[in-house]
Image (cartoon, helix red, strand yellow):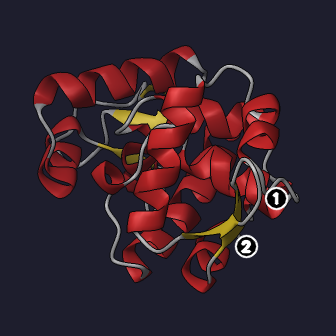
């Protein structure tokens, strides 16, 4: 799944911590109300408002022109938003299967999994492939991924010692 997703879309989807679960919340009905999202995801109002603003700026959601009835959603997905929400829904479902929540992963977690899936296995390869990310951010992300058993780290003897990273079975489930 991640291997077929364009990396810029993945970066945008993961750029704001709550954007992925918010878009996944749109997926079942194609629309949502602010209060429903607030209750189902359980995040602060301002975080939800920021995520909705980003989704609207990307053209993924729009205000429902027929809003006004209590049962009609305030926001609906656009055609491009439906595709992104479908992907977000699949990723959110896989995360749920693995017992992960959005705060368990960092902004760079899914792009790192995508890079590992494509064959990069050394830290410097990841730094080059994920150029906007700082080495510190990637290092912290790899620590989080190793702690969540999504990535394995093998230290090779030598001078200086080097590390190779690989996807674990859990990481393959989320990435593949």
Callout 2: helix, strand or loop?
loop
Q: Residue furthest front?
A: 159
Pointer 2 local density, CA inside 10 Å: few below 14, some 14–19, many at least 20: some
Question: Is 39 or 150 nearer to us in this picture?
Answer: 150
Looking at the image, residue 86 sits to the left or right of residue 162; the answer is left
Image position, residue 172 (x, y; %): 67, 76
Q: Is residue 63 left or right of residue 159?
A: left
Quadrant containing the N terminus is bottom right
In which quadrant of the rendered image does the C terminus lie?
bottom right
Drawn side of residue 113 relative to residue 108, left or right: right
Q: Is residue 77 in view from this perspective?
A: no
Residue located at (37% from left, 26% from top): 52
Nearest the camera: 102 or 42? 102
Count of labels in the image: 2
Task: Give the residue at x 66% y 45%.
Answer: 111
Where does residue 8 sit, x and y in percent of width and height? 74, 30
Residue at 40%, 69% (x, y): give it.
148
Nearer to me, 1 or 28: 1
Which comes before the other along the chain, label 1 or label 2?
A: 1
Name the image quarter holding residue 123.
Answer: top right
Q: Residue 88: horizontal and vertical position, in percent?
A: 54, 54
The residue wearing badge 2 is 176
**Residue located at (59% from left, 51% from top):** 110
Q: Find the distance from the CA under tag 1 to the CA under tag 2.
A: 7 Å
Q: Which class describes the residues within 10 Å of circle 1: few (<14), some (14-19), or many (20+)? A: some
Q: Is residue 165 visible?
A: yes
Please report contact status of discs 1 and 2: CB closer than 8 Å, yes or no: yes
Give the residue pinned by disc 1.
Answer: 3
Q: Which mark is residue 55?
A: none
* Residue nearer the viewer, 14 or 69: 14
- Measuring from the top left, give residue 24's x and y in whole percent: 44, 54
Asked which quadrant contains residue 171, the reply is bottom right
């Amino acid at each position: 799944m991640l291997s077929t997703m364009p990396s810029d879309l993945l970066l945008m989807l993961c750029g704001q911590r709550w954007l992925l679960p918010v878009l996944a919340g749109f997926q079942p009905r194609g629309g949502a109300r602010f209060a429903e999202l607030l209750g189902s995801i359980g995040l602060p109002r301002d975080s939800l408002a920021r995520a909705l603003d980003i989704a609207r700026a990307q053209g993924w959601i729009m205000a429902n022109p027929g809003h006004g009835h209590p049962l009609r959603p305030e926001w609906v997905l656009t055609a491009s938003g439906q595709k992104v929400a479908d992907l977000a829904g699949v990723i959110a479902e896989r995360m749920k299967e693995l017992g992960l929540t959005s705060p368990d992963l960092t902004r760079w977690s899914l792009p790192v999994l995508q890079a590992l899936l494509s064959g990069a296995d050394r830290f410097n390869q990841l730094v080059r492939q994920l150029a906007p990310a700082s080495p510190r951010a990637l290092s912290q992300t790899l620590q989080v991924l190793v702690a969540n058993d999504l990535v394995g780290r093998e230290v090779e003897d030598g001078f200086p010692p080097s590390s190779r990273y690989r996807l674990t079975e859990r990481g393959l489930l989320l990435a593949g």
